Amino acid sequence: MKRFKLFLYNLFFSPYRYSRKSTNWRNAFGLMPFERLLYRTMTFVGGNSIEGDYLEFGTYQGRSLASAHHIAQLYSLKKMRFYAFDSFEGLPEIQGVDREGFCNFKKGDFSCSQEDFLKILKKRGVDLNKVQLIPGWFDQVLNDETKRSLPIKKAAVIWIDCDLYESTVPVLDFITSYIQDGTIIIFDDWFAFRGNPNRGEQLAFREWLTRNPQITASEFRKFDWSANSFILHHD
Ligand SMILES: C[S@@+](CC[C@H](N)C(=O)[O-])C[C@H]1O[C@@H](n2cnc3c(N)ncnc32)[C@H](O)[C@@H]1O
């Protein structure tokens, strides 16, 4: 029933999804893997009474954030707010371990201005009162000052979609204090860099867990060819 309601919602309130220009056209009558994952995530969050917000790091044109917003409404997660962290200038200079061997990312990829991002969200039927943008490079803005300026208490869902190891490290350090037992963390690029565990998001996550022994992770679901997700536990 909820799936049917989402289908109707998208059909009538989210015209982009069915426009001929949209790469999603072929999926108009089915859910994409990331949407199925969001369904399961919001079911898990609702079913386990996990309170908290949705934090996305790497938002580009808002595709995953808009879907998370719509699906959260279906699951009556009315108090959930949506935080969009991005440079709004695309990827940074590729450096360090991200430059080693195979890498199909380059500086400036996925650039979308704040104005365009908000326009797209509005067109997709997102309630902008529930959304807050935090613009800037992660290694510069993800700090205590930003934390103090945000009303976030705990995270229910964290979506990490910033492709690179160098971008993921400051993200993980920033979210540590928002973790609770049951926070779902999603890595969109888990199998980037040919799935090498010593690169990208996999390496950053492993190092973060080592730095934070109070936090453990159990695998939740893999989806699409590139992504993976975990349930986090906090002592
Ligand atoms: C693949 S896109 C995100 C796609 C998006 N989640 C969606 O639903 O389509 C990657 C995003 O990460 C952002 N990003 C990557 N590294 C960053 C960094 N160090 N600081 C800020 N933004 C970064 C880019 O600007 C870009 O918007």
Image (cartoon, grey):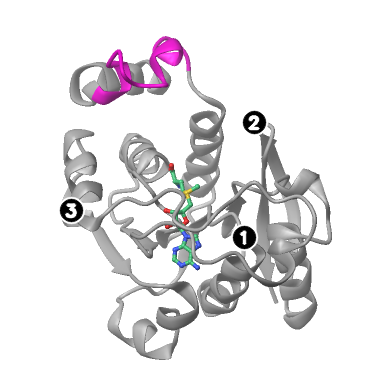
Left or right, residue 164 beside residue 45: right
Does the magenta-highlighted stretch encompass residue 28? yes
Q: Quadrant of residue 222?
A: top right
* For marks 3 and 1 on the same chain, the one whose residue lies earlier in the sequence: 3
Q: Element under label 2?
A: loop
Where residue 199 sits: x, y (%)? Answer: 77, 60
The span from disc 2 to disc 1 (Cα, nearest Å) is: 18 Å
Where residue 207 sits: x, y (%)? Answer: 77, 73
Residue under numbered circle 1: 164
Task: Point out which mark residue 224 bears.
Answer: 2
The span from disc 3 to disc 1 (Cα, nearest Å) is: 25 Å
Q: Residues within 10 Å of mark 1 (few under 14, many from 20)?
A: many
Task: Point out which mark residue 25 bears.
Answer: none
* Quadrant showing the N terminus: top left
Whether label 2 touches label 3, CB < 8 Å? no
Q: Residues within 10 Å of mark 2 (few under 14, many from 20)?
A: few
Instruction: Identify the residue at image location x=42%, y=89%.
Output: 144
Does the magenta-highlighted stretch encompass residue 162? no
Where residue 157 sits: x, y (%)? Answer: 49, 55
The mark lying in front, picked from 2 and 3, is 3
Instruction: Identify the residue at image location x=19%, y=18%.
Output: 12
Which range of residues does the magenta coloring cover?
16-30
Label 1 lies in ligand 1 vicinity (Cβ under 8 Å): yes
What's the amino acid at mark 1? Leu
Q: Name the residue nearer the viewer: 106 or 25.
A: 106
Residue under numbered circle 3: 115
Residue 180 in view, yes or no: no
* Quadrant showing the C terminus: bottom right
